[in-house]
Image: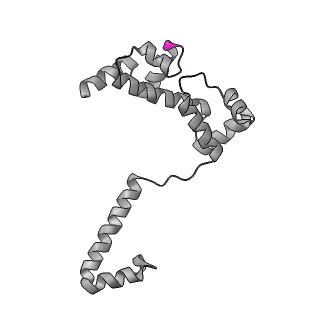
Amino acid sequence: MYSRIGEHRDLLDSLEKGLSKQDVEIICDLIEGHIRTLLEKFPAKAAGNPLVENIKSYIMDNLEYNITISLIADIFHYNKLYLGRLFKKETGESITDFINAQRLKRAARLLKDTEQSILSVANRTGFNNVTYFNRLFKNFYEVSPKEYRASHRKND
């Protein structure tokens, strides 16, 4: 028990004054359990590379536009090959895969929450070709945009 309290010995001393040793153990176990639950539920985010975080932020703010690696490289004044490797190293996915995943997630929200046509959703999320949008959406969610909308309308 004392090793779990560590440098907070004064806290343990004040607890022991008003409580039995068994009560203090129970309290410590409860607190430790809550801390473990919180850490599992909300894992600490390691501060990522600031450049990669800025690129992600730019992408999220501009999903409806034509975003290319060349455009990102020009905006951030870096070589596109370097940016591509750095992004992949930091995130585990390519910039293009990240862009498409974010667009598809936004499209899914729009399909679920609005009455906009599938063509309109595709355009609002940066897909200028509805056939390509449908194919990517089906690969990502394993259902077509129309089926996704229908299934989420029933569940609401």
How many circles with numbers are drawn on the protein? 0
Residue 128 on the magenta span: yes
Q: Quadrant of residue 21?
A: bottom left
Q: Quadrant of residue 85?
A: top right
Residue 78 image point, x, y percent: 74, 36
Q: Quadrant of residue 79?
A: top right
Residue 151 image point, x, y percent: 29, 23
- Overall secondary structure of the magenta stretch? loop
Query: What residue is at 25 percent from the left and 28 percent from the top?
Result: 155
45 shown above or below 130: below
Location of the C terminus (image quadrant): top left
The residue segment tinted magenta is 126-130
The answer to whether residue 56 is left or right of residue 133 is right
Residue 97 on the magenta span: no
Q: Is residue 1 visible?
A: no
Query: What residue is at 49 percent from the left and 22 percent from the top?
Result: 125
